[in-house]
Image (cartoon, rainbow, N blue to C red):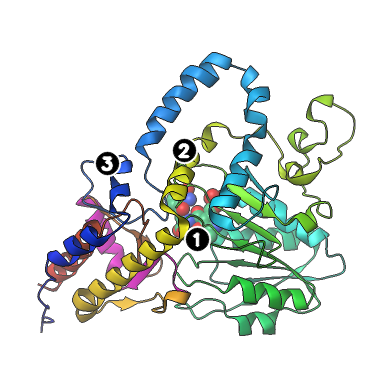
Amino acid sequence: MATPIPAPAQVNDATALDAADPLAEFVSRFVASSDVVSYLDGNSLGRPLRATEERFASFIRAQWGGRLIRSWDEEWMELPLVVGDRIGASTLGAAAGQTVVADSTTVMLYKLIRAAVDARPGRSEIVIDDDNFPTDRFVIEGIAAERGLTVRWIRPDKSAGVTVEQVRDAVSDSTAVLVLSHVAYRSGFLADVKEITAVAHESGALVLWDLSHSVGVIPTALDEWRVDLAVGCTYKYLNGGPGAPAFGYVAHRLQSELTQPIWGWMGAGDVFAMSDGYRPADGMRRFISGTPPVVGMLAMQDMLDLIDEAGIDAIRAKSLALTDYALHLVDRWLAPLGVAVATPLEHTSRGSHVTITHPAFKAVTAELWKINVIPDFRNPDGIRIGLSPLSTSFEELNRGVTAIRNALVSREK
Ligand SMILES: Cc1ncc(COP(=O)(O)O)c(C=O)c1O
Ligand SMILES: Nc1c(O)cccc1C(=O)C[C@H](N)C(=O)O
């Protein structure tokens, strides 16, 4: 027998929420894609800002086209550190001189984890959870193989994240480094960075946080929480564009102690000395390897402007309002159709995406993309509703969940 379908919510729900939203105006700052009915994937690839069109045009005219190679001295050499400091100040709670932009997230993870492991000689283990993003797990397995170490796996419940208690059990005086994600890419669970870092420090381990799914939507206080190392993507909630480089954070107190493994000329003390032998630069520059990805650092600067204008705390408040509304719609429309929620319900444990599960979601996602409703699918049976607060309205979210509901209903007929 077909499941009885509850009546759809009043359209007014979303209209009223948008009307009351103090950040509603920001949606119009992004490039509108005329065919898209609902974009729920800003946690994978953020939308471009309209301001970025002009930034790119002016970059080609004035900097690349006008100043040509002189721009390296005039601006570009410092850009990884300047933009890094901006990310640190606007979103991370990091004082200047501890954040750099370079490489892909994968390569930055490799460099910082290898440096951390080498700074803890005699310790035989790296600890990570087995539900972490593949690149984090693979990089660690590679470093363990390279350095003759063992990986100790924390096994979180798939619909939860890594708890303080699990870390207390897993970390010991054999642990060189603990690597965790602030927001779990699948479930959306938000880890307790401060407590977990403190617990790992009791055993003398270093801790690296992957902030890919939180930077730009959830304020952090890396300095205050005594975080050692962090990395993150800039193409999600920092809207840096496809393939935009990563950022890396290394606390001041560790910088001179850490040697990263990719010794390139751009991280050397005197870049243009072209001297024999590698001597790392002082400070964060030593974590750079090759030529800075200048073009890839353009768009994120517009998003950092927007984050400063809106305020990271207001962004977090809207993120929670959006995920609350998503959960409300799921409960009202999708739960009766057999959909389960894999995201924690408490605000203190929730990132900016909501993951829901149903055996038909792989096929449903393919159908949704055909009608320009764009969430993403994550194995084995999850749809991730990613909510980028400055570019997503409550109406857009309502349209997306309505489409998921319609797709499930038509399968029951
Ligand atoms: C937690 C996490 N780490 C790393 C990455 C990606 O790394 P990269 O930019 O090198 O592909 C992603 C997403 O792609 C991610 O979700
Ligand atoms: N980085 C991506 C890519 O290059 C292609 C497609 C998707 C992605 C992603 O961002 C995946 C994402 N990190 C995730 O959480 O699943």
Q: What residue is shown at x 37% (from left), y 45% (from top)?
A: 47
Query: Within the image, what quadrant is residue 386 found in?
Result: bottom left
Q: Can residue 400 be seen in this view?
A: no
Q: In this view, does 391 lie above or below 213?
A: above
**Sequence-first disc among 3 and 2:** 3
Please name whichever residue, 116 or 256, is drawn nearer the observer in this view of the structure.
256
Q: Find the distance from the CA under tag 2 to the CA under tag 1.
A: 18 Å
Q: What residue is shown at x 81% (from left), y 77% (from top)?
A: 173
- Regarding mark 2 in the picture, which secondary structure is present there? helix
Residues drawn in magenta: 349-371
Please name whichever residue, 37 or 49, is drawn nearer the observer in this view of the structure.
49
Residue underneath mark 1: 214
Say what amino acid the circle numbered 3 marks: Ala
Q: In x, y percent, where is residue 64? A: 54, 20
Say what amino acid the circle numbered 2 marks: Ala
- Asked whether the beta carbons under mark 2 and mark 1 sit within 8 Å of each other, the answer is no
Q: What residue is shown at x 36% (from left), y 55% (from top)?
A: 41
Q: Is residue 33 left or right of residue 257?
A: left
Q: How crowded is mark 2: few (under 14 residues within 10 Å), some or many (20 or more)?
A: many
- Regarding mark 3 in the picture, which secondary structure is present there? loop
Residue underneath mark 2: 299
Q: In x, y percent, where is residue 134? A: 55, 61
Q: In x, y percent, where is residue 100? A: 65, 45
Q: In x, y percent, where is residue 180? A: 61, 67
Residue underneath mark 3: 32
Query: Within the image, what quadrant is residue 303 found in?
Result: top left
Q: In this view, does 93 lie to the left or right of 380?
A: right
- Asked whether the beta carbons under mark 3 and mark 1 sit within 8 Å of each other, the answer is no
Q: Is residue 397 above or below residue 411?
A: above
Q: In this view, does 202 lie above or below 281?
A: below
Please name whichever residue, 163 or 27, is drawn nearer the observer in this view of the structure.
27
